[in-house]
Amino acid sequence: MLHVNENYSKIQASYLFTEIAHRVSAHQAANPDAKIIRLGIGDVTEPLCDAVVKAMHKAVDDEAARENFHGYGPEQGYAFLREKASKVDFQDRGIDIAADEIFISDGAKCDCGNIQELFGNDVKIAVGDPVYPVYVDTNVMAGRTGANEGGRYGGLTYLTCDASNGFVPGPEAAGDADIVYLCYPNNPTGAVATKAQLQKWVDWANDRKSLILFDAAYEAFIRTPGIPHSIYECEGARKCAIEFRSYSKTAGFTGVRCGYTVVPKGLVAFASDGSPVELRPMWTRRQTTKFNGASYITQRGAEAIYSPEGQAQTKATIDFYLENGRLMKEALSALGYEVTGGGNSPYLWVNVKGDSWEFFDKLLKEANVVTTPGAGFGKAGEGYIRISSFNSRANVLEAVERIRKVL
Ligand code: PLP
């Protein structure tokens, strides 16, 4: 008899964004003339910048000529992109990461999910609550958890992120976790971690021989000097951390698909006899076996992000989103709501002083504005909504006006 992977049945039936889509379409059907503004899903709205578009056009021309044509590329990514990423994202910031420690992929989501293949099924996992659902669901699928009871899976350690810890939990909550997922700037709370806070995690991981999976998908939004852009800014992090990067929010690549994962040389996990096993060769093996590389055209586009024009243009777009966030944060704060995030992140995390789905429904039905209920990101997200800055200025101003009237 053909058996299914029954771990899938543990996953909570209604995926957050499916439920939101369902409520939004029901509202639209009942109110066909309503002009709904979507501040919910974290997809970008601004187009690719000129430097990227030109590089991709040129790459298409390369593919059209026999002498410049590229078929299968290296599974780990083209050297031209790995070298630029290691130089600009790390070495120019004084961080020791080499090109051959960078693995180009089709985005951070896949890498966040795929990386756990390298680890035993008995490893103990710690995640934030609220959390980007991919870290949790991929471990549920792999069978590392028990059933979901009351919004939390058995066997996972949840690190509550709330106002009491400034939405940045410390390692004292991680117990005997072997792997901890950290994400800063955070999705969904928009919180950032200081170097001292991250250093504590790195010291904890090195002491315990645990691993940090650091998701830096939103690092390009950091504007406050001194806030780390990478876990490798912390001393000793090369020995205990893997980092995920994404061009999705950095450069509007949500539809193009490109990112990378950093696996430093010398980073190890342990075999059952206690002997160390290097993770970088394992990840190389995983990628060369199961992945055939991001496309040449995509990687040429990503390379252009690192040109002086690309850097200036992508920064201007992020500044635009940050200004959207500033406008919304100012308005909500003036209405008496506590707002975390913005400033160094595209997300605002708003304490709604009540039930998050009820607040979501109120904004949807009375203001025609879609947000994301915090409860969808975990138990500790109850009482909050997430607002995304990815939108046109006109929509943001209109949404602010409508929210002001309703609240
Ligand atoms: N990590 C976090 C925290 C995210 O919020 C997202 C997307 O929303 C991703 C990773 C996925 O990035 P990508 O588009 O590169 O797959």
Image (cartoon, rainbow, N blue to C red):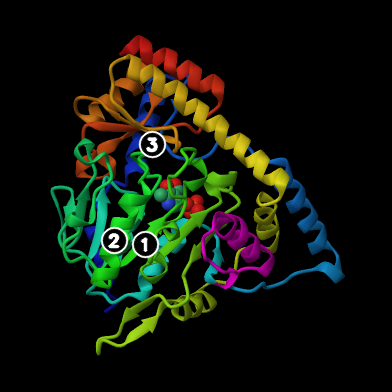
The stretch drawn in magenta includes residue 83: yes
Q: What residue did someone put label 1 on?
A: 213
Mark 1 surroundings within 10 Å by alpha-carbon count, few (fewer than 14), some (14 through 19), many (20 or more) = many
Among the 4 quarters of the image, the one containing residue 76? bottom right
- Magenta extent: 76-100
- Residue 315 falls left or right of residue 187: right
Q: Residue at x 67, y 72 (%)?
A: 73
Measuring from the top left, give residue 7's x and y in whole percent: 25, 65
Mark 2 Cα-neighbour bin, 10 Å: few <14, some 14–19, many ≥20: many
Question: Disc 2 on helix, strand or loop?
Answer: strand
Look at mark 2 in the image and give the residue it sits on.
Answer: 180
Pick whichever of labels 3 and 2 is earlier in the sequence: 3
Query: Which of the two labelled residues, at mark 1 and mark 2, occupies the earlier sequence position?
Result: 2
Name the residue that disc number 3 marks: 21
- Image: 359 above or below 55: above
Q: Amino acid at mark 2?
A: Val
User: Can you give x and y, in whole percent of width and height, for residue 345 in the image?
Assistant: 44, 38
Q: Quadrant of residue 74?
A: bottom right
Task: Note whether 302 is above or below 313 in the view shown.
Answer: below
Report how far apart the C-alphas of labels 1 and 3 lie in the structure.
30 Å
| Mark 3 neighbour density, 10 Å: few (under 14) some (14–19) many (20 or more) | some
User: Is 350 situated above or below 397?
Assistant: below
Residue 136 visible from this viewpoint: no
* Disc 3 residue type (three-letter): Ala
Question: Image check: 345 left or right of 189?
Answer: right
**Cβ at disc 3 under 8 Å from ligand 1:** no
